[in-house]
Image: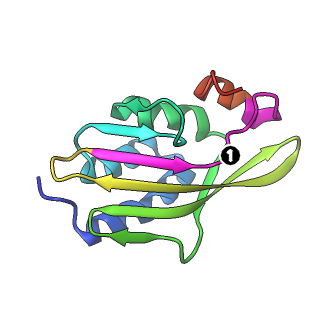
Amino acid sequence: MPKPTFDALKTWATNYPKLWNAGDKQAWIDSYKKVAPGNVRMLDPVGTPEKVGFEHCCADSWDLFQPNVRFRIVPGSLFICDNEVAWLLENHFTSDGRDQIGLSIETYRFEENGDLVIRTYYKVPRHSEAELGEMFKTYLPDNG
């Protein structure tokens, strides 16, 4: 499989928050699989143990976070360079009854063999931090 084209990566990037926010899990998974049908590895965030496999890296995250978090790629922050995509993502959620935004920098490297490497950068919430902390007790249990 050749590396995904610019247009394929642009379509995937456009669909990433759109399908997530619409709650369309199967379409979100299908969109991923079009550009990354191989193995997925992820450091989420960098500095935590590596996750391996599409289910663990992507589908499990959907099940845990999608009901409570909405995404928006900050305008002007989407970069597609050859086989890599990077963006600054706004993560919208409600905590302690207040609407909040957490920022994450995310990079995606799509390999010629269909594999994908994801690296994210953000401040990990403490487990004591209301709703988001509760989710991270499950997602990163050793980073309380």
Query: What is the span of residues highlighted in magenta in the rendered image?
Result: 116-133
Query: What residue is rendered at 28% in x and 71% in y?
Result: 7
Secondary structure of the residue carrying numbered label 1? loop
Expressed as whole percent of the image width and height from the top left, the position of residue 57 reads: 43, 35
Q: In percent of the image, x 45 and y 42: which residue is there? A: 25
> In the rendered structure, does residue 131 fall within the stretch colored magenta?
yes
92 left or right of 94 in image = left
Which image quadrant: the C terminus?
top right
Question: What is the image's colouring?
Answer: rainbow
Residue occupying image coordinates x 76% and y 33%: 126
Counting from the top left corner in percent of width and height, residue 6 is at 27, 71
Rendering quarter of residue 40: top left
The residue at which mark 1 appears reads as 123
Q: At 36% from the left edge and 30% from the top edge, which residue is drawn?
A: 52
Place of residue 119 in the rendered image (x, y in percent of width and height, measured from the top left): 45, 48
Nearest the eye: 5 or 23: 5
Q: Position of residue 39 (x, y in %)?
A: 26, 37
Residue lying furthest front: 47
